[in-house]
Image (tube, helix red, strand yellow):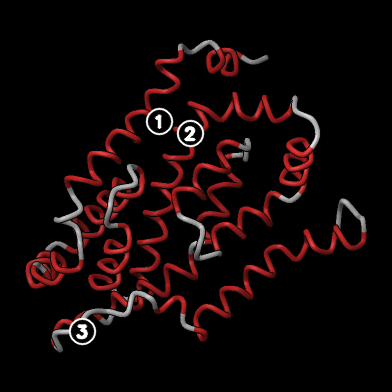
């Protein structure tokens, strides 16, 4: 065992659980305190000030936006969807999507690391020593990690914070988590960022954006197609009985 591994295993419970406890505490407080301040109305009422600040401080706006988005995602605060819309509103569809995906991945990674440090090692060890159904589930996930990681990112019904915690509890390597998160959230981010990019016209008409756009057939069906592609290796393995393709 390396010195790094030994230091991780000898950390006190307080040190191991502190990051996860802080995130959970801030999430609970933020859910009550911020829910009336982060929303579509706030974006509409402050749109002119945001645009003016962006035009005079573009780089600072990008950096500040990423920082705020990372905090929202890390602490599971209300407003992640509004933040994505704001990214499109401020930076356009494609650059805004790049900023949104980068910030969301950074925040997700922080949650992943906190969960892995606090509970991941214990749960993984328990699953590895289990038998029966739990052991089969763990084995199946280990053999198809890439497919399952992309699947839970692409399916619109899987909450973002849940998709951050499950891999941490199953011992998914950090590099694999980061890559699958970054690539897997691109389709959904593009959809909502494009909605945000059109908010100027929506505001001018006094309307509200269609946030259910992702569930419309012309959007949902291609995403579901990607979901099927993500689990296709699992299906082929099950049909052919081969462990490797």
Give the distance between the C-alpha atoms of the residues marked 2 and 1, in whole angstroms: 6 Å
x and y percent of residue 83 in the render? 28, 61
Task: Give 108 or 239, whichever is nearer the viewer.
Answer: 239
10 Å crowding of disc 1: few (<14), some (14-19), many (20+): many
Q: Quadrant of residue 46?
A: bottom left
Residue plotted at (87% across, 51% down): 243
Mark with earlier residue (3, 2): 2
Residue plotted at (20% across, 68% down): 40
Q: Quadrant of residue 98?
A: bottom left
59 left or right of 239 in image: left
Q: Which residue is mark 1?
A: 20
Task: Count the numbered circles shown.
Answer: 3
Q: Which mark is residue 115?
A: 2
Q: Which residue is mark 3?
A: 202
x and y percent of residue 131 in the render? 79, 30
Give the distance between the C-alpha atoms of the residues marked 3 and 2, in whole angstroms: 39 Å
View extreme (bottom): residue: 205
Residue plotted at (29% across, 74% down): 196
Give the SS element for disc 1: helix
Marks 3/2 in contact by CB < 8 Å: the verdict is no
Mark with earlier residue (2, 1): 1
x and y percent of residue 81 in the render? 32, 63
10 Å crowding of disc 3: few (<14), some (14-19), many (20+): some
């Amino acid at each position: 065992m390396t010195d790094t591994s030994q230091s991780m295993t000898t950390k006190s419970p307080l040190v191991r659980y502190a990051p996860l406890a802080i995130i959970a505490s801030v999430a609970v407080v933020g859910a009550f305190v911020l829910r009336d301040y982060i929303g579509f109305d706030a974006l509409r009422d402050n749109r002119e000030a945001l645009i003016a600040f962006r035009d005079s401080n573009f780089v600072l706006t990008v950096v500040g936006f990423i920082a705020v988005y990372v905090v929202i995602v890390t602490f599971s605060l209300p407003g992640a969807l509004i933040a994505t819309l704001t990214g499109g509103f401020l930076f356009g569809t494609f650059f805004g999507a790049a900023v949104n995906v980068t910030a969301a991945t950074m925040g997700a990674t922080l949650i992943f690391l906190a969960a892995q440090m606090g509970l991941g090692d214990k749960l993984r060890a328990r699953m590895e020593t289990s038998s029966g159904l739990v052991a089969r589930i763990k084995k199946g996930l280990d053999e198809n990690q890439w497919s399952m990681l992309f699947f839970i990112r692409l399916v619109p019904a899987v909450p973002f914070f849940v998709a951050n915690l499950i891999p941490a509890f199953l011992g998914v390597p950090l590099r694999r988590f980061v890559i699958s998160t970054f690539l897997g959230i691109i389709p959904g981010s593009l959809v909502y960022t494009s909605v945000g990019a059109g908010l100027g016209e929506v505001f001018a008409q006094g309307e509200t954006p269609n946030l259910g756009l992702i569930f419309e057939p012309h959007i949902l069906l291609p995403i579901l197609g990607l979901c099927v592609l993500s689990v296709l290796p699992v299906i082929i393995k099950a049909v052919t009985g081969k462990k490797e393709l």
